[in-house]
Image (tube, grey):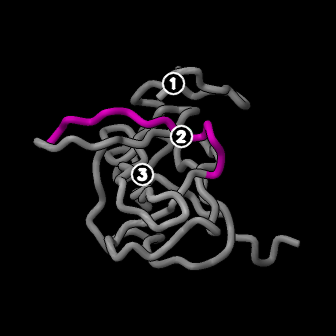
Amino acid sequence: MHDETKKTGKPDLTKTDADWRQKLTAHQFHVLREKGTERAFSGQYWDLKDEGSYHCAACGETLFLSETKYDSGSGWPSFYQPAGSDCVKEVADHSHGMIRTEVICSNCESHLGHVFPDGPPETGLRYCINSASLDFDGKAGKE
Ligand code: FE
């Protein structure tokens, strides 16, 4: 993947761990800033079917749209594509004895989850994202 990140708004790359700890819950900090993974079926969004957009819980960047969310059966929110071509970055991840592709927010580089090549026909991709990394913004009642 390319490293040319389009900086929309203000990038959050200057925040320190102390700043992030102030802004995030301990669980969010662990997932977003320490590349943690929430337990399957434990997050608040894996089964959410409402219409709306999913934003980075750390910086607010729009990351995924409900139109591309599907039920993967994994217990984590799953999407077949990001909201835009440059809102997430993909990074090789060789941790835990596996070869995976990590997905991070392109704006603040917080950990979101992983992408796997076993998604639905639309793209063949499964973006497997922690609920803790997301903030859902529902369309209902906004108009
Ligand atoms: Fe972010």
- Residue pictured at 34% horizontal, 72% vertical: 75
Q: According to the image, label 1 marks what residue?
A: 2
Q: Position of residue 139 (x, y in %)?
A: 75, 71
Q: Nearer the viewer, residue 123 or 65?
A: 123
In the image, residue 7 lies in the stretch drawn in magenta = no
Q: Ligand 1: give its quadrant.
A: top right
Q: Residues within 10 Å of mark 3 (few under 14, many from 20)?
A: few
How far apart in space, not on screen, are marks 1 and 2 (Cα)?
11 Å
The image shows a total of numbered marks equal to 3
Q: Nearer the viewer, residue 118 or 51?
A: 118
Foreground label between 1 and 2: 1
Q: According to the image, label 3 marks what residue?
A: 25
Type of the residue with mark 3 = Thr
State if disc 3 and disc 1 touch (CB < 8 Å). Answer: no
Type of the residue with mark 2 = Val
Q: Residues within 10 Å of mark 1 (few under 14, many from 20)?
A: few
Q: According to the image, label 2 marks what residue?
A: 88
Q: Nearer the viewer, residue 48 or 121?
A: 121
In the image, residue 88 lies in the stretch drawn in magenta = yes
Task: Choose top left, top right, bottom left or bottom right for residue 53.
Answer: bottom right
How far apart in space, not on screen, are marks 1 and 3 (Cα)?
31 Å
Closer to the chain start, of discs 1 and 3, is: 1
Start-end of magenta stretch: 83-96
Instruction: Give the secondary structure at mark 3.
Output: loop
Instruction: Give the secondary structure at mark 2.
Output: strand
